[in-house]
Amino acid sequence: MNLQQLRYVRETIRAGLSLTTAAGRLHTSQPGISRQIRQLEDELGVDFFVRRGKRVIALTEPGRILAQIVERALEETENLRRAAAEFRDPEAGGLTIAVTHTQARYALPRVVAEFKRRYPRVHLSLLQGNPPQIAEMTLAGTADVGIATEALANYPRLLALPGYTWQHALIVPAGHPLTAQARVSLESLARYPLITYDAAFAGRTHIDEAFTARGLKPDIVLAAIDSDVIKTYVELGLGVGIIAAMAFDPRRDVDLRMLDARHLFRTNTTRIALLRGRRPRQFTYAFIALFAPNLSGAVVEKAMVASTDSYEL
């Protein structure tokens, strides 16, 4: 038994049981992966996979249990490397953050600047995506930390900690009729075409829920993944924008007006996700604490230990 064989099993499962896809991801041949998995099965005396000819079509019942052990074994191998790197040089290494556009554009700049000041020898990378993509990048280990409002809490293998809360706001061009209302109602808002986030982004579910609860069907003429795109089309007069309040900058958005929407939509929670069982570097804890001061290193580490002890992969 060797680590390479375990990696072949794990990647085959992650590739949806496609040996060809797994081989491509691991830069090897499909027959080579198949042969190595067969050798591991022969050594253990148990098959991981149900086969039809040369195709893998399902996990066996023992394979489902063994796959959990494979996942933990490989994660502990990576933890060993991370722990050794921590002892060699605790202030050098790499940190990859998967994040949505709104968080990267409006919530992270101050955090990134301070982190780079404190850890100049840590190579920091930002990967942008939608919340499901961010979850998948964190699950796969492509990202060390995932940051998003939607979706992260829906993945059992992720520890999704609450970072901070925020509200939606309405944005309109200067002189828009809604600016004359002291308190905009959902009914009056629904009379206008709306521009807001794509269904996977930035608390969009709370927007949809609010209209549905009042029996209203909003006319969403544009759904975007980017707050700046929403603001651009609001400036063009295409509709009323609904954005994260943090994305409005009065110094730059001089042709727009922001209207309070706290009474219209539920509060949103941005979450910070870590892969359960994966040992973070100390500078990872530092980054999280800069982003969400309530999540100190001690708090996150305690949550990681508790969640790993109580969770089966």
Image: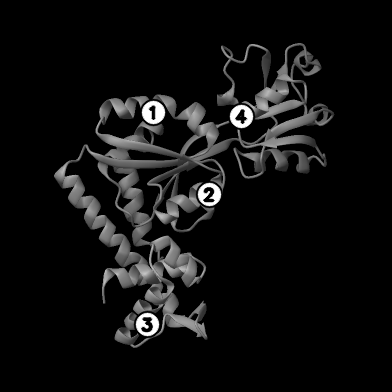
Element under disc 4 = helix
Residue identifier under label 3: 38
Question: Of the residues tagged 1 and 4, which is closer to the observer?
Answer: 4
Question: In which quadrant of the rendered image does the N terminus lie?
Answer: bottom left
Q: Could you tell me the amino acid type at mark 1? A: Val
- Is residue 202 shown above or below 135? above
At x 43%, y 26%, the residue is 109
Q: CA distance from mark 2 to mark 3?
A: 32 Å
Q: Kindly tell me whether residue 179 is visible in this rendering.
A: yes
The mark that comes first in sequence, 2 or 1, is 1
- Is residue 186 shown above or below 22? above
Residue identifier under label 4: 227
Q: Could you tell me the amino acid type at mark 2? A: Gln
Mark 1, other Cα within 10 Å: few <14 / some 14–19 / many ≥20: some
The mark that comes first in sequence, 3 or 1, is 3
Depth order, front residue of 203/38: 38
Element under disc 3 = helix
Q: Are marks 2 and 3 in contact (CB under 8 Å)?
A: no
